Amino acid sequence: MATKTKNLGLTKPDPGEFYDVIDSNGNMDIIDENITAHLADKSNPHSVTKSDVGLGNVSNTSDSNKPVSTAQQTAIDAAYQQSTGYTDTKIANLINGAPQTLDTLKEVADAIQQNESVVTALDSAVGKKANQAELDTHTNNSTIHITSTERTKWNAKQDAMTVDSALSSTSTNPVQNKAVNAALTSLNTDLAGLVKYKVITVTTSTNGFINIANYISGCYLYATVTTAGYLCLPCQADTGSTASFSKYVRCFDSNMALLSSKSVTLQVYYI
């Protein structure tokens, strides 16, 4: 007599029995149903563990809670420092040393709003600035700007403007023109005719005095001794006059000794 299997209840004929096709088909249906159910079962019916499949070191956590390796953390920290440094630098450049009361966009906006008249004036001034075409026209204006060649010529003329060493009626030096030269020549002529001199040879008194008034008729200016080794100085009269520096001179030798009753030659200047 046929029996049933323990797990699936399949019909199993005895050795002396003929195999029934109906029992065989029934067994196939039972097997198919159990295979289908087994495939659909996601509850780990075989109780397989992560160690059974070589995943014993894997943490059973969500992606957001998974830890990172030391190398990954180092890279993340470095990237953070770089991004923070870059951001800080850009902010510092934007502020650019602005005072604390104007180091945010909000503070700048408030300041602009409070000073609208100033902002309007600045906008007006900026609007009046020359455009590029106007700037180019001004830059290329050869009438109001000197060229490098002209500057060189002017500098050469400046260097050449020196005073002549001697007066000349034909001088072309712009510093000494002919009109000035003519006036100087006329003045020299007048002075030459005004100042006169006379050479006299006289004998000094016993005290070394000479009265120039005895030898000229004009206004005495000064006198020099032309006799070698002698000199003369203006002085008061030897008659006891208190008049300062009259027409008297007193003569000395090179040792400042008085020339008593000595013959000397004088060049006397008078007008």
Image (cartoon, helix red, strand yellow):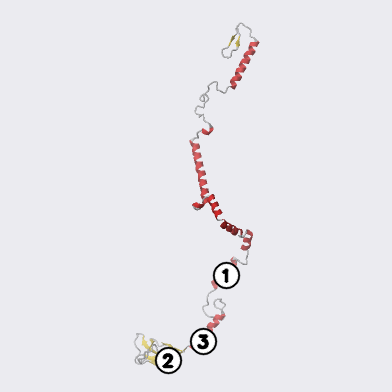
Q: Is residue 166 above or below residue 102?
A: below
Q: Please give the name of the residue rendered at 53% of the width and 83% of the height, measured from the top-left corner.
A: 185
Q: Which residue is mark 1?
A: 154
Residue 213, can we see it? yes
Q: Secondary structure at mark 1?
A: helix
Q: Say which quarter of the image contains residue 160.
A: bottom right
At label 1, the amino acid type is Trp
Q: Secondary structure at mark 2?
A: strand
Quadrant of image for the N terminus? top right
Q: Which residue is mark 2?
A: 200
The mark that comes first in sequence, 3 or 2, is 3
**Label 3 crowd bin: few (<14), some (14–19), many (20+), radius 10 Å:** few
**Label 2 crowd bin: few (<14), some (14–19), many (20+), radius 10 Å:** some
Q: Residue placed farthest to the right in the image?
A: 21
Q: Number of callouts in the render?
A: 3
- Label 3 close to label 2 by CB (< 8 Å): no
At label 2, the amino acid type is Ile
Q: Which residue is mark 3?
A: 190
Residue 96, can we see it? no
Q: Is residue 224 above or below residue 90?
A: below
Q: Residue placed farthest to the front in the image?
A: 114
Q: Position of residue 163 (x, y in %)?
A: 52, 76
Q: Position of residue 212 (x, y in %)?
A: 41, 91
- Label 1 close to label 2 by CB (< 8 Å): no
- Label 1 close to label 3 by CB (< 8 Å): no
Q: Secondary structure at mark 3?
A: helix
Q: Residue placed farthest to the bottom in the image?
A: 214
Q: Say which quarter of the image contains residue 37.
A: top right
Quote the CA–CA distance across marks 3 and 2: 25 Å
